Amino acid sequence: MTPTDPPHTPAPHGGEEPSDGLRPAGQRQDKPWWKHLWVWVATVIGGVASTVLAAVLTDIISGDDDDQRKPLLTSERHVRPFTDEGELRPPFEDSRKVKEGRCDAASLSSTDPAAWRCGFEEENGSALADPCWTYALKAVCLRSPWDPQALIIENVDLAPRAHLSTKPGTLPWALEIKDPVGGDTLRCSWAGGATATIAQQRVNWRCTDDDDEVIGDAAGDVTQSKSAPWTVLYSPDDSSEVQKAEILTVWY
C-alpha cells in the first residue's frame, strides 16, 4: 500500500510556510535582553545630562539677572595730589601761587592723616586753606576733589603736630550723592565753621549741581552698609522735606 502524502496547507496571506518551528520569514525576532538594558541606560544618562545642562544655563541666566539687580555700592576714594617727584597729578593744576605760608594744624576738612590746615598772607590780609598736602617745603591746597584749580604755597613752615586729623569721627571730606527726587548727581563739599542743623544734626556738607550752584545740604553722619549704597540725610533748598540720599562716592 502506497503511503498517502499529507495534505498541503497554504501559508497564511501568501507567505512562506513555517519551517522547523521558526517564526515566519520577515517577522522580527525579539532583541537580546542586554540590548534593552543598554537602551534604558542611554535614556537615563541622556535625561540626567539634559537636566544638568538646563540647571547650568538657568544659573548663568539667573546670575546675570542678579548682577543687574545688584545695587551699585558706594566708592571710597582718597586724594594724592603729588607724584613721587613732587609734581601735581592730573587733573590738578597750579592756578594760583603764594610765596610763603605756615601749616601748623591737622586738616579740619579731610580725615587724611597727611592733610594740613595752612595759613598764608594775601593782599586783603590773612587767609586759610584746608585741606593741603605737602611735598618738601611746598604745599598744594584744594577746594574739593573735583575742582582742578589748586593753590600752591611755594615755601611753607611746617609746625610739629601729631599726624592725626582733628576732624570729628570719620566724616568724609566730600560726597557725591544721588538726588532722591530727580536722580541727578550732586556734589557735596565739607562745610567748615558754624552751620545750621537738620533733624537735630549738623549740616556737614553743602551740595551743588553741575553748574556749581548750591541747591541743598547733607547733614549728620554717613550710614554705611556692606550690601547697599551708603546713605546720608539730604535737604534741598527749595523744600522743607528731609530724605535719605544714596551716596555714590566718598572722599577722605
Image (spheres, rainbow, N blue to C red):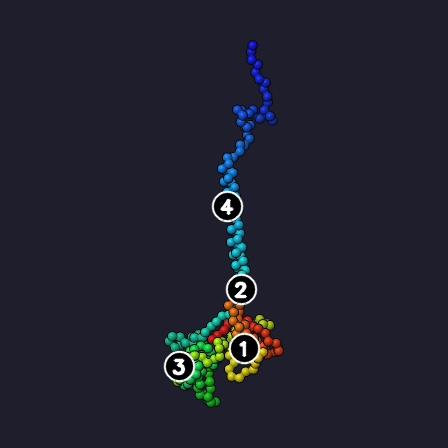
Q: Nearer the viewer, residue 135 or 67?
A: 67
Is tag 4's residue or tag 2's residue first in the polypeptide sequence?
4
Pointer 2: what residue? 70
Marks 2 and 3 close (CB-CB < 8 Å): no
Is 47 situated above or below 120?
above
Is tag 3's residue or tag 1's residue first in the polypeptide sequence?
3
Is tag 4's residue or tag 1's residue first in the polypeptide sequence?
4
**Residue pictured at 46% horizontal, 83% vertical:** 129
Q: Which residue lies most toward the top here?
A: 1
**Residue pictured at 53% horizontal, 33% vertical:** 30
In the image, which disc is placed on residue 45? 4
Amino acid, disc 3: Lys
Q: Nearer the viewer, mark 4 or mark 2?
A: 4
Is 131 situated above or below 2?
below
In the image, which disc is placed on residue 220? 1
Inter-mark Cα distance, 3 to 4: 74 Å
Residue 2, by quadrant, is top right
